[in-house]
Amino acid sequence: MNTSSSRTSRRQFAALTTAAMAATLCPLPALPGETPVRKRLMRLTLSPGAIGVKANPRETLALAHQYGFEAIEPNANFLTDLSDADLAAFRAEMQARNIVFGSAGLAVNFRQDDAKFRTSLEALPKIAAGLQRAGVTRVGTWISPTHAELAYADNLRQHATRLREAAKVLRDHGQRLGLEYVGTPSIRQNRPNPFIYSLRQMQELIAEIGTGNVGVVLDSWHWWTAGETEADLLKLTNADVVSVDLNDAPAGIPLPEQQDGKRELPCATGVIPVKTFLGALQRISYDGPVRAEPFNKPLNAMDKDAACAATIAALKKAAALITDN
């Protein structure tokens, strides 16, 4: 659950590894009398698996309501198997608690051999129909930044061909497909055939797919590790962004040595400029889900209540940097 081009220099980020910088990059919300940013449209989302919480969909909804999340990650199998009456009741409970659906995962095996891809693709229409019936409009997945065998051009062609077929099915069911690039440099070290690891490269893949319903999954971690800037984000529109992950990085570790599976909750260290990242999304009027995906062992070791409480506190702290709501 759960990616070569010229990039801006990463040297500027090496200094952002001390606790002192956290106060600058994640400052307190605006004081009374200061002009607030317009109302936030993005929804703070509970994705249990992303924070090490085991919870079925009904438990997830209850936890989201208890701790103040605004959206939940949809479970395609659960929603597809519900009767019309049970689905109506579940959606009514969500509406009563002012909770909406975030982004579902893409249930297509596009990374392995063609037989596995075809088998999973054949099952997609039923899954997409189940999500459509529940009102889910966003689906996402990630792209590996290397390949064991395929060179860049061949890998791009294969990804575009396979994902185009999946995107067409989703389009027929009113859904957008989001693709996440993985910017972490250490993942590409000593591995053959680098692939997509930047926003610009991802946009090239999206253009090659060409179905009109494919956008990007943005992650503050990958935006930062790819050496990207606020200006890169401001080139996007709301329609370009399907979903967002929000994370921070451990302090005291040079960017090239950061490990993808060792992250922090938003605003935990201030290494990643969360205010800049979210502020750009606010400026383009992004209105989709925002979840935390920190791959953090201490967080995963907490019980579900403590983990949910810590996660929503971090997300709200980040959101308070850009708006008074």
Image: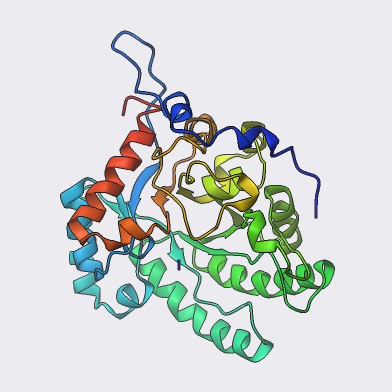
Q: Nearer the viewer, residue 55 or 140?
A: 55
Residue at x 63% of width, y 39% of height: 236
**Which quadrant would the C terminus be assigned to in this image?**
top left
Q: Nearer the viewer, residue 38 or 137?
A: 38
- Residue 123: horizontal and vertical position, in percent? 50, 84
Residue 295 in percent (x, y) is at 42, 59
Determine whether, in the image, residue 65 is placed left or right of residue 18.
left
Tell me if residue 96 can be seen: no
Give above or below for 29 relative to 287.
above
Quarter of the rendering containing residue 254:
top right
Residue drawn at x 44%, y 77% is 127
Please say if 177 is above or below 284: below
Q: Nearer the viewer, residue 293 or 103?
A: 293
Residue that lies at the very extreme toward the top in this rendered image: 33
Q: Residue at x 54, y 32 (%)?
A: 280
Would residue 314 appear left or right of 137 to someone viewing this image? Answer: left
Is residue 103 toward the left or the right of residue 155 in the image?
A: left
